[in-house]
Amino acid sequence: MSVWYGGLINKRGNKPKRQKIKKCKRIALAEAQNWRCAYCGCVMEIETSTADHVVPRSKGGSNFHTNLVAACFLCNQERGAMPAIDFWFSKNVQVEFSEYCRLQDRQSRRAAA
């Protein structure tokens, strides 16, 4: 018997395993952000960089590059499934109001999609 699950057909009826983010994608994300964490701004190394989902996988987010940012291991673990914008502001990052509005608009468009 086949079971439909999130676009995948699993003949055993089990939930398919999550795909792991490849190291080359993680490095590309970190390089695009100049090896800085998206949340706290610390400088990351290959060992401490992680790919963080803007919209968490548990809330329907994908592994597509537009849903990923590079974050240090500590921020990624601390954030969990908290909305990215709320976590970002909890880290006391100083930002202009126009940037905040742009990020809020981007998040609402992603949630609607």
Image (cartoon, helix red, strand yellow):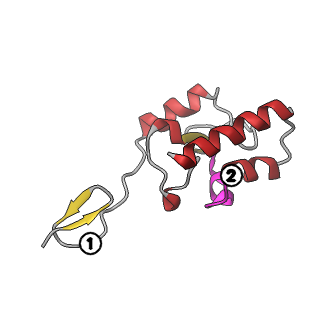
Q: Nearer the viewer, residue 60 or 53?
A: 60
- Residue highlighted by disc 1: 14
Residue depicted at x 68% and y 39%:
105
The residue at which mark 2 appears reads as 75
- Tag 1, which secondary structure? loop
Give the residue displayed 45% in from the left and 35% down from the top.
25
Residue 72 coordinates in the image, percent (x, y): 65, 45
Disc 2 residue crowd, few under 14, some 14–19, many 20+, Cα 10 Å: some
Q: Is residue 101 above or below residue 81?
A: above
> Vertical placement of 40 versus 24: above or below?
below
User: Is residue 52 something that shows in the picture?
Assistant: no
Does the magenta portion include 94? no
Foreground label between 2 and 1 = 1
**Amino acid at dot 2:** Cys
Q: Which of 73 and 108 lies nearest the eye of the viewer?
A: 108
**Range shown magenta:** 72-83
Which of the marked residues, 2 or 1, is nearer the chain's N terminus? 1
Do callouts 2 and 1 mark residues in contact (Cβ within 8 Å)? no
Residue shown at the point (61%, 37%) measured from the top left:
45
**Image point 63% across, 29% down: which residue?**
33
Residue 42 percent location from the top left of the image: 74, 38
Given the current orientation, which residue lies at the most extreme front position? 112
Look at the picture and state if 85 lies above or below 12.
Answer: above
Quick one: 39 or 62, which is closer to the camera? 62
State which quadrant residue 103 falls in: top right
Residue 74 percent coordinates (x, y): 67, 54
Q: Tell me the element at label 2.
A: helix
